[in-house]
Amino acid sequence: MLQISGSQLYYLYRPFADMRRGFDSLAGLVLTGMGKSPTCGEVFIFINRRRNQIKLLLWEGDGFAIYYKRLEKGTFELPRHNPDSSCLYITSSQLRWMLEGISLRSIRLRPRYRLKIENQI
């Protein structure tokens, strides 16, 4: 079962991904396309071109796990990003909102302290 935690780091792979990719191929994208180690314990997010499918890849200590969701209607909204970067840090709240279909642009967050993370929006 997928558990989204505020203590976990989430990275969105910015180019669109082919959803036929499996464990090893997605891990290769993390390593070469994002410059990160796929076994570091962070969650890596991939979305297809039509934005109706999403895969989350994570290392669970003894192997990879993939969470895969396909929408029957609608699309996943992507957070605003720097178009030059290949990966984007997103918060657990943003991921939850994406999965639940809540518009990221209409949410107004109250000021809070956040630790600066590389590629943070």
Image (cartoon, rainbow, N blue to C red):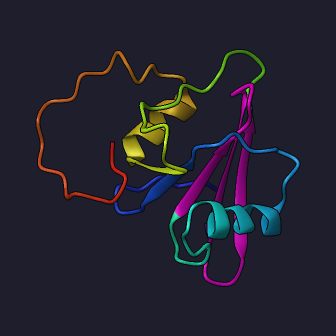
| Residue at x 74% of width, y 30% of height | 49
Q: Measuring 54% from the left and 23% from the top, which residue is drawn there?
A: 101
Residue extending farthest bottom: 62
Residue 38 lies, in percent from the top left, at 62, 72
Q: Is residue 94 left or right of residue 47?
A: left
Q: Is residue 105 above or below residue 80?
A: above
Q: Dividing the picture into quarters, in which one does residue 107 lie?
A: top left
Which residue occupies the foreground of this view, 79 or 93?
79
> Is 14 part of what is drawn in magenta?
no
- Considering the image in quadrants, where does the C terminus appear? top left
In the rendered view, tell whether residue 109 sits above or below residue 65.
above
Of residue 74 and residue 26, the one placed in the foreground of this image is 26
Span highlighted in magenta in the image: 43-69
The answer to which image quadrant residue 2 occupies is bottom right
Q: What quarter of the picture does the N terminus occupy? A: bottom right
Number of labels in the image equals 0
Image spot of residue 45 (x, y percent): 60, 50
Pick out the residue farthest to the front.
Answer: 84
Task: From the viewer's perspective, tell me whether residue 114 is left or right of residue 21.
Answer: left
Q: Position of residue 66 (x, y in %)?
A: 72, 58
Q: Residue at x 69, y 28 (%)?
A: 51
Q: Residue at x 55, y 50 (%)?
A: 86
State whether the magenta stretch is mostly helix, strand or loop.
strand
Instruction: Verify whether residue 48 appears in magenta.
Output: yes
Horizontal arrangement in the rendering, residue 54 relative to residue 76 (left or right): right
| Among the 4 quarters of the image, the one containing residue 105 | top left
Q: Position of residue 97 (x, y in %)?
A: 46, 31
